[in-house]
Image: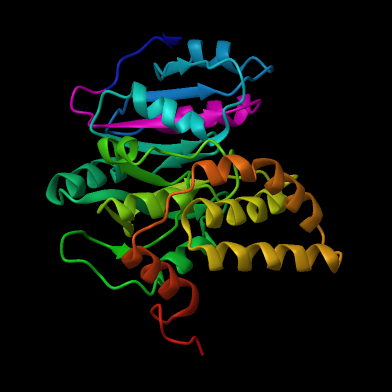
């Protein structure tokens, strides 16, 4: 059930900030401090994915007035769907408990959505804190091979950083949001595919600035999750030869003893029956765009 903490958002706020968190109380409170200081005064939704460190009580007493959503268990990335359903603004900015927005960025995003009716999702330029260095994802997004569109700003992309995007709420929800089968790890790619297939623009817009202060070191299990979800995404949306080829690649890595390949394969096999039941092929023109991103050549032409 949602709970309303003390405080009020700005009357002109058109973008809700949605945060998912689990057992990262101090990091979350720092993020709420940053969001409270924004001139836009956005409403904030915090989805607590089953924390046991006092996160819920801390959110209730934080002066940002964040609304707390407590599903009672760890929903993974699907917690963002829950937040989007509860939002009462046309646009939703997704953050994690260690990321926040530059002052003025949410106002800029809302103006772009107002101007471009087919714009579905904006991926921001992200600076890594402390230090303010460029996140390597910025260069990948800026270098997208996809052709520009006249009906949206920025650079069309087929992926993004989930903690640094703003979405049109109606587009996000109509596309189904994040897929429950993936939980965490590269889950953004499938959403980018589905939004694109529905005709929405998914773009990188460097004029939007976000900040990310991740804990140092690799998150345990992330490499396995990325490999598992890349394969599941292929089975959920890609042509059969692509899915079979991706499966063969992971099997080959397992035979060679590559770290994490066996675990990724086991986790995929457990989820594969559900993926096959939910399989829905992408339109051919979207598959052409994916091939262009992956190989630099349109479908039907051999990659060099």
Residue at 28 percent across and 50 percent down: it is 198
Of the pair 137 and 72, the residue shown nearer to us: 72
Q: Is residue 216 above or below residue 36?
A: below
Tell me, yes or no, if residue 182 can be seen here: no
Residue at 82 percent across and 59 percent down: it is 259
Of the pair 298 and 67, the residue shown nearer to us: 298
Residue at 42 percent across and 82 percent down: it is 297
Instruction: List x then y, in percent, for residue 263.
Output: 79, 50
Q: On the rendered structure, is 103 left or right of 140? A: left
Instruction: List x then y, in percent, for residue 111.
Output: 17, 45
Q: Which residues are magenta?
A: 10-35
Q: How many marks?
A: 0
Of the pair 56 and 226, the residue shown nearer to us: 226
Q: Is residue 148 above or below residue 214?
A: below
Q: On the rendered structure, is 141 left or right of 183? A: left
Q: Magenta stretch containing residue 30, yes or no?
A: yes
What is the residue that sits farthest to the bottom in this orientation? 304
Tell me, yes or no, if residue 125 can be seen here: yes
Q: Magenta stretch containing residue 46, yes or no?
A: no
Residue at 37 percent across and 62 percent down: it is 157
Instruction: List x then y, in percent, for residue 288.
Output: 37, 71
What is the residue that sits farthest to the left in this orientation? 115
Of the pair 298 and 203, the residue shown nearer to us: 298
Instruction: List x then y, in percent, for residue 239.
Output: 48, 63
- What colour scheme has been applied to the protein in the rendered image? rainbow
Which quadrant holds residue 131?
A: bottom right
């Amino acid at each position: 059930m949602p709970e309303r903490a003390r405080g009020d958002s700005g009357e002109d706020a058109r973008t809700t900030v949605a945060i998912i968190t689990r057992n990262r109380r101090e990091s979350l409170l720092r993020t709420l401090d940053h969001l409270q200081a924004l001139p836009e005064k956005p409403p904030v939704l915090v989805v607590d994915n089953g924390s046991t460190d006092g996160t819920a009580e801390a959110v209730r007493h934080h002066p940002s007035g964040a609304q707390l959503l407590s599903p009672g268990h760890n929903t993974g990335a699907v917690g963002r769907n829950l937040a989007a359903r509860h939002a009462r603004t046309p646009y939703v900015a997704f953050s994690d408990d260690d990321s926040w927005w530059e002052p003025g960025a949410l106002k800029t995003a809302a103006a772009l959505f107002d101007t471009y009716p087919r714009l579905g999702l904006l991926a921001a330029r992200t600076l890594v804190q402390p230090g303010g260095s460029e996140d390597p994802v910025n260069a990948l997004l800026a270098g997208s091979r996809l052709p520009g569109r006249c009906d949206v700003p920025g650079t069309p992309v087929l992926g993004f950083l989930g903690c640094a995007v703003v979405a049109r709420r109606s587009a996000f929800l109509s596309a189904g949001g994040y897929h429950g089968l993936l939980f965490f790890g590269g889950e953004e790619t499938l959403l980018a595919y589905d939004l694109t297939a529905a005709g929405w623009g998914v773009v990188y817009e460097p004029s939007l600035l976000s900040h990310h202060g991740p804990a140092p070191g690799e998150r345990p299990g992330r490499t396995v999750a990325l490999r598992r979800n890349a394969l599941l995404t292929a089975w959920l949306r890609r042509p059969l030869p692509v899915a079979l080829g991706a499966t063969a690649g992971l099997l080959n890595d397992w035979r060679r003893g590559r770290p994490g390949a066996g675990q990724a394969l086991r986790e995929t096999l457990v989820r594969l029956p559900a993926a096959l039941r939910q399989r829905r092929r992408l339109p051919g023109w979207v598959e052409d765009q994916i091939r262009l991103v992956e190989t630099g050549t349109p479908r039907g032409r051999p990659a060099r």
